[in-house]
Image (cartoon, rainbow, N blue to C red):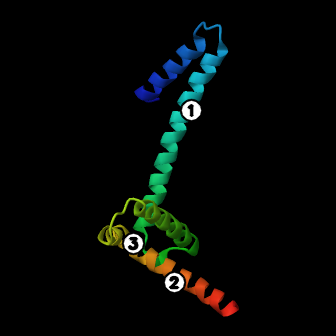
């Protein structure tokens, strides 16, 4: 084991071997440690997945990745648009990153197809 792991292990043993009358404090401490570890692991996995999807070329992505990334980009744009005050800032938000342009264009194409079907059906 590495020294950091030994330190955490010794802290955990000390906590478990402490002579507390209330086992709920031990349980609460363990839950706090578990939550911190899960939070770190989730952030690492999300960062790794996001980095992998961003590094792949658009034409080589599967449809599943494209749809997931489309909704992620649109969600990010919508949250940033809430802070916009004028049209120039709006355009800066939409064209902030290179891959956003592709997904915004794809979104408008899908939106146009939906509107087309609505107009034809009525």
Tell me the mark number nearer the camera, choosing from 2 and 1: 2
Gap in angstroms between the C-alphas marked 2 and 1: 45 Å
Given residues 29 and 45, the one toward you in this image is 29
> Quick check: 84 left or right of 1?
left
- The reply to whether discs 3 and 2 touch (Cβ–Cβ < 8 Å) is no
Name the residue beneath numbered marker 2. 109
Few, some or many C-alpha atoms within 10 Å of disc 1 (few <14, some 14-19, many ≥20)? few
Q: Is residue 23 above or below residue 65?
A: above
Query: Which SS class for mark 1?
Result: helix
Given residues 13 and 22, the one toward you in this image is 22
Q: Residue furthest left?
A: 88
Tell me the mark number nearer the camera, choosing from 3 and 2: 2
Q: Residue furthest bottom?
A: 120
Query: Which SS class for mark 2?
Result: helix
Gap in angstroms between the C-alphas marked 3 and 2: 16 Å
Name the residue beneath numbered marker 3. 99
Q: Is residue 114 above or below residue 15?
A: below
Name the residue beneath numbered marker 1. 34
Identify the residue shown where x is 42% and y is 74%.
Answer: 57
**Quarter of the image where the C terminus is located:** bottom right
Identify the residue shown where x is 53% and y is 67%.
Answer: 71
State which quadrant residue 18 falls in.
top right
Identify the residue shown where x is 32% and y is 68%.
Answer: 86
């Amino acid at each position: 084991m590495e020294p950091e792991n030994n330190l955490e292990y010794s802290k955990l043993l000390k906590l478990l071997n402490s002579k507390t009358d209330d086992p709920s404090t031990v349980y609460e401490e363990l839950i706090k440690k578990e939550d911190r570890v899960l939070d770190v692991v989730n952030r690492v996995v999300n960062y790794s997945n996001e980095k992998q999807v961003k590094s792949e070329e658009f034409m080589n992505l599967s449809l599943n990745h494209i749809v997931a990334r489309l909704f992620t980009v649109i969600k990010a744009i919508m949250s940033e648009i809430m802070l916009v005050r004028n049209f120039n800032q709006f355009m800066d938000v939409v064209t902030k990153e290179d891959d956003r342009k592709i997904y915004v264009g794809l979104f408008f194409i899908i939106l146009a197809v939906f509107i087309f079907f609505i107009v034809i059906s009525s």
